[in-house]
Amino acid sequence: MRNDSWFIRSDISPDGKTVLFHLPRGRGVNTEWDLWTAPLTGVDATLLRENAGFARYAPDGSIVFLDQPQNFVSSGISIMDGDGTNVRKLVGRGGTYSWPQVSPDGTMVAYRESGLDVGIVNIATGEFTILNASSEEPPWYGNDTLIVDR
């Protein structure tokens, strides 16, 4: 059976002028995702990055995203400037990653790692911690608290 379902995950830029979203390219199991931006004024969208999706803006306008996502997971999480330049890997040491969430102060990214574990990576240093906790999409409550299932 072919699964042709998909959804758009979007985010609004910190300055409130741009929407960030991903769209599928292709159909079915091997669907590829591309990141797009568009001004909220309704002008044409711009392709920001191919083979990237499930992105979130950081407070400084940089963008955290999944590299080459397949079936809602990826083998890496990266960050780039808001214009798509200066890409660098945040997480990618084996396993799968999903649902990156930037902390309100923009210093950390929480994510789901290989199964249900929650990981946190420091954007500046790359240091990471795996929590003995689970969450489908770990939300931040303030700058240093995550809401998790256990």
Image (cartoon, helix red, strand yellow):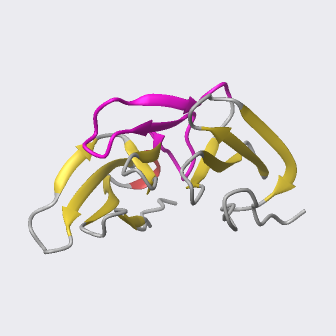
Q: In the shown orientation, is residue 109 left or right of residue 120?
A: left
Residue 133 is situated, as x and y percent measured from the top left of the image, at: 86, 54
Q: Please state which of residues 51 and 32 is positioned toward the viewer in this rendering.
A: 51
Residue shown at the point (56%, 55%) measured from the top left: 105
Q: Please state which of residues 95 and 37 is positioned toward the viewer in this rendering.
A: 37
Q: In the shown orientation, is residue 17 left or right of residue 130?
A: left
Q: Which residues are magenta?
A: 66-94
Q: Is residue 86 above or below residue 28?
A: above
Q: Please state which of residues 49 and 123 is positioned toward the viewer in this rendering.
A: 123
Is residue 86 magenta-colored? yes
Residue shown at the point (67%, 58%) measured from the top left: 143
In this view, the residue farthest toward the bottom is: 41
Q: Looking at the magenta stretch, what is its main secondary structure?
A: loop
Name the quarter where the C terminus is drawn. bottom right
Q: Quadrant of residue 30?
A: top left
The image shows a total of numbered marks equal to 0
